[in-house]
Amino acid sequence: MTHDERRLLRHLVIAVTVKLVVLTALWWVFVRDNHVQVDAEQSAQQLGITPAAPGAQP
């Protein structure tokens, strides 16, 4: 591996690491505490099916 190839590899590793850190920080700040409530009726309506009765076996 030549000096230029090692330098390029080092720069790529640094760039990917920085991007992962930034994405993780953004997720931690904006997404981590957001929870989506899942409702069976609304989900079934979105999929165009009828919801199963509670306790019904598939």
Image: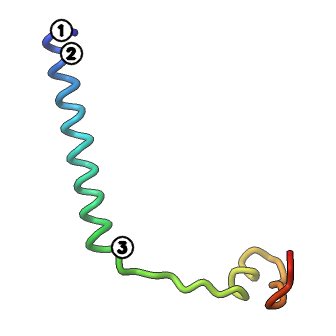
Task: Determine crowd level at label 3: few under 14, some 14-19, many 20+ residues with C-alpha closer than 10 A.
Answer: few
Whether residues under marks 2 and 1 lie with C-beta atoms below 8 angstroms apart, the answer is yes
* Whole-number angstrom distance, CA of label 2 to CA of label 3: 38 Å
Kind of residue sitting beneath label 3: Val
How many numbered marks, from 0 up? 3
Residue at (86% x, 79% y) in the render: 57
Kind of residue sitting beneath label 1: Thr
Residue picked out by circle 3: 31
Q: Position of residue 39 (x, y in %)?
A: 65, 87
Residue picked out by circle 1: 2
Residue at (15% x, 21% y) in the render: 7
Label 1 or label 3, whichever comes before in sequence order: 1
Residue 42: name its quadrant: bottom right
Task: Determine crowd level at label 1: few under 14, some 14-19, many 20+ residues with C-alpha closer than 10 A.
Answer: few
Residue picked out by circle 2: 5
Depth check: give the residue in front, 51 or 57. 57
Q: Position of residue 52 (x, y in %)?
A: 83, 84
Kind of residue sitting beneath label 2: Glu
Label 2 or label 3, whichever comes before in sequence order: 2
* Whole-number angstrom distance, CA of label 2 to CA of label 1: 5 Å
